[in-house]
Structure formats: C-alpha cells, structure tokens
Image: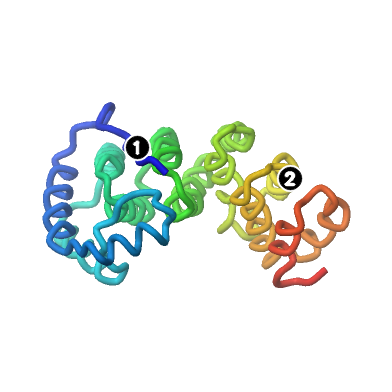
Amino acid sequence: MTVTGVGTADVPPSALADTVLQRLTAAYGAKRDPAGAAAMRAYMKDVAPFLGIPTPERRALSRSVLAGLARPDEADCTAIGLRCWALPEREYHYFAVDYLRRYAGRCSSAFLPVVRRLVTTVSWWDTVDLLAVRVVGPLVAADRRLTAEMDAWITDDDLWVARTALLHQLGYKDRTDTGRLFGYCLRQSGHPDFFVRKAIGWSLREYAKTDPDAVRDFLARERGRFAPLTVREALKNIGA
C-alpha cells in the first residue's frame, strides 16, 4: 500500500494544536522502537509506517501530552486531527482518533467533512471504525439532518465511506433508525469487498443485542441477498 497524508491545506490556526503537536512529536518520537515498528507495520498490512509504541505506553504518553491543557473548540479539533494525519507514523493518527472521540461533543455538524477527509486518507479499519462509531455516530445523533449525508455516504464508491455509513449507528441501541440500518445493508448487500460485507454483518449483530427478532425476521426475508460471511456475523450471538 502507498501512504498519502492529508497535507496541511485548510488547517485552521490553533495555538492549542501548536502546543499539542510540539509535545506529541517530542513524546512519541523519543519512544521510537524500530523492531516494534516493523512488526506493527506488517500486522497492519503496510498501511502506514509506525513508531513502534505499544498501545498502553502510547496512551500513557498521550495523557502526559494533554496534561494541563484546555479543552478544544471545533477549530482546535480540526487542526489537531488534520495535522496529526499529515504525519506519516500511524501512532499520530491513533492519537487524533482518541482525541476526536473524546471531544466529538464539542464539534458541530460542520465537522463532518473533516472526518470524511480522515476516513478517506490512509484508510484502514483501525482508524475508520472508531471514527465511524465514536465521531460520526455522535455527530449524526446530535443533528439528525446529517442522516441525508449518511444516505449519500452509503452509495459512495469509496468502500471506507460506505463502511462508515453502515457502522455509524453501532452504539445507538434503541435509538437505531432500523429503516436506514436495514436499507443500508440491502443497498450494499452485493458489495464485492470483505470490509463492507463484514460491516453489514457487524451492524446487524450489534443491533440484534437490542432487537434480535427484528434481525432474525430481516434475514429470514433477505438472507439470500447476503454473502455467507455477512449472515454468519449477523447471527453469531442469536442463532438462525
């Protein structure tokens, strides 16, 4: 895979981002482990280079980076997200995902295009799924007008954008829009890519925790349209 960053165009000025990035690159850079980096890169199918910092240590470093700093506004979140993504090593992207998960509630619906840039740049499940569930999901829940954007994303040619639309309701439970959930699953039922087929099954399996009968009934009607992988995933915890 080739690695392409988002660049720095359209990054708003942010004194907070200046401080965070200065601290972050110093803290993470000091813990570089070439052997660990090679193993992590191989495990993640060469999606990006790594510094080689294990997750527990990385999160401890992140807490030290953020110690004493103010909470961000939307411009700060935009700057931190895009500037982290412009750095090549994957741990910086993980920092951005964790940061945006934490502060998604401080962002408006206007933040969705920023998240789309992150979803479609250096794309892999390790960042896309958390952005879908923990950032896009809360944004849509806070402004239901964004469901129209999800209706567009589910038809997108970029498989990661479609996967995000499938997964954004994953934490909604009884607030799930079942019409959209089932409609999105049907819309992408014939998708050739593993990651989309897997996401359909995952979204159905998660909703089955809230309404197993609805998922069973849906698959009783429509299972012939889905790949066996999708059906197995959907029924994993509830049976046929």
Q: How is the image coloured?
A: rainbow
Judged from the image, the secondary structure of the residue bearing numbered disc 2 is loop
**Residue 173 x %, y %:** 62, 60
**Residue 48 x %, y %:** 35, 49
The residue that mark 1 highlights is 4
Report the amino acid beneath label 2. Answer: Ser
Measured in 3D between alpha carbons, the distance from the residue under mark 2 to the one under mark 1, in whole angstroms, is 30 Å
What is the number of the mark on residue 92?
none
Residue situated furthest top in the rendering: 9
The residue that mark 2 highlights is 189
Quadrant in which the N terminus appears = top left
Q: Quadrant of residue 210?
A: bottom right
Identify which residue, 44 or 200, lies in the foreground.
44
Report the amino acid beneath label 1. Answer: Thr
Judged from the image, the secondary structure of the residue bearing numbered disc 1 is loop
Would you place residue 146 above or below residue 55 in this image? above
Q: Residues within 10 Å of mark 2 (few under 14, many from 20)?
A: many
Left-right relation of 1 to 175: left
Identify which residue, 2 or 201, lies in the foreground.
2
Identify which residue, 8 or 214, lies in the foreground.
8
Q: Say which residue appears at 57% left-offset and 40% top-offset.
A: 159
Residue situated furthest right in the rendering: 221
